[in-house]
Amino acid sequence: MDGTLLRGRSSFPYFALVAFEIGGILRLLFLLLASPIAGILYYFVSESAGIKVLIFATLSGVRVGDLESVARAVLPKFYSMDLHPESWRVFSACGKRCVLTANPRIMVEAFLKEYLGADMVIGTEIATYKGRATGFVCHPGVLVGANKAAALRKVFGEVSPEIGLGDRKTDFAFMNLCQVCASILVR
């Protein structure tokens, strides 16, 4: 999603928006304090580790209902303003639309289905306990690299999706499973 359907390559602004909308200034401050750790992990250890830190700092202890409300009422406006016109042109021309994203599914699904007409959203799943997000990621983890390819295989089986769009080297694993790959958006 980030860098492909959206112009911005970073999901940090959206995590910050969710943190502020749900937890106010204290939650946002916690996210800001955790962001250098997330950045170091993202760039020097693994993309997945950095995203896990952002997810934990933003979502730990948050009521799932509150998160769903923010995902429906607040995030679509900001996602819409960041929509990449060329990616949207390709995406909207497809018959059946499936989005694979490293972002938490609960944060992006409403926008993708209700505003962009996605038929299916496969994203990182967040663990919950008694109606609250724990901040931890469910198995198989953050959907990047091999996890994204495995998720695609799980849903589509042996049938190859027609078109795969991506913007990172870690997207090549799932894009290679598609009939046509478009990595023209790599910057």
Image: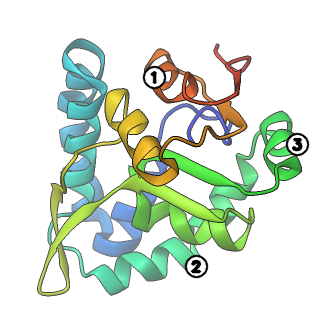
Label 1 near label 2: C-beta < 8 Å?
A: no
Q: In the figure, residue 106 lies in which quadrant? A: bottom left
* Up-down relation of residue 130 to residue 27 (above or below): below
Residue occupied by mark 2: 73
Is residue 32 visible in this depiction of the protein?
A: no
Residue occupied by mark 3: 89
Q: Residues within 10 Å of mark 2 (few under 14, many from 20)?
A: few
Can you give x and y, in whole percent of width and height, for residue 12 in the image? 42, 42
Residue occupied by mark 1: 173
Identify the element where label 2 is drawn.
helix
Q: Residue at x 67, y 19 (%)?
A: 183
Q: Residue at x 56, y 38 (%)?
A: 2
* Up-down relation of residue 107 to residue 168 (above or below): below
Q: Residue at x 70, y 46 (%)?
A: 82
Taking 134 as reference, is 15 left or right?
right
Disc 2 versus disc 3: nearer the observer: 3
